Image (tube, helix red, strand yellow):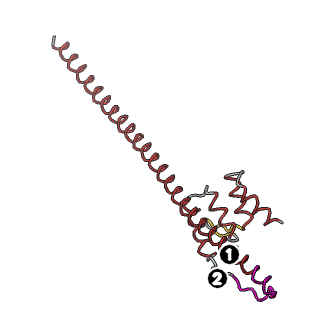
Amino acid sequence: IKRWKKEAYENELAFNKSLAKEKKANATVREKLDSEAQLREEIKRLKKEAHDHEKASNKILEERLAQLREEVNIWKKEVHDLEEERIANGTSPDNIVEPRKKHDSEADKECYQRALEIGRNNKTAWYGLGTVGGGEVDGKHYIAEECYRRALEINPNFADAWYQLGLNLG
């Protein structure tokens, strides 16, 4: 009977050790699953943050583009008015005064470059960078033609980029 009790005791000890190992393994698996779930949440958060940054940069660029379009319309009107005045007065084109407002292409370039640091797949920023003659993005210099081509890689139906690329190549 002593031998039988001893075997039972040893079997119980072995079972308890095995059970403890299994609990430890289950805890490790639970930790890994929790860690994986946390990673998934972090990835989801980072994707949303990147999307929000891209939306913000697009909004900034759209606002700047609207300002530039307004300036162009003002310039066109001033040029038109000056042309009419020249024709009415019979004056030479050399006497025509340049439009009063000029935009700062360096500031524009900085805005486009900053937008591209935030989101490299921003067709509007690539297009805008091309309109100011190109610039540096992530340590690489892009000429205007390359900027228009990058915009067209993102959106092959971007008509303005095709037009500007044609003018640039022509």
Does the magenta portion include 97? yes
Front-most of 118 and 58?
A: 58
From this view, report whether residue 91 is shown above or below residue 64.
below
**Depth check: 159 or 106 in front?**
159
Image quadrant for the N terminus? top left
Q: Residue 29's quadrant in the figure?
A: top left
Give amino acid for label 1.
Trp
The span from disc 1 to disc 2 (Cα, nearest Å) is: 8 Å
> Image check: 118 left or right of 105?
left
Residue at position x 60%, y 58% from top? 120
Q: Which residue is mark 1?
A: 75
Identify the residue under disc 2. 100
**For residue 81, side relative to residue 63 (left or right):** right
- Image quarter where the C terminus lies is bottom right
Q: Secondary structure at mark 1?
A: helix
Q: Please state the horizontal and vertical placement of residue 158, each as a whole percent of the image.
A: 70, 54
The magenta span reads 84-98
Q: Are marks 1 and 2 in contact (CB under 8 Å)?
A: no
Label at residue 163: none
Most foreground residue, 117 or 91: 91
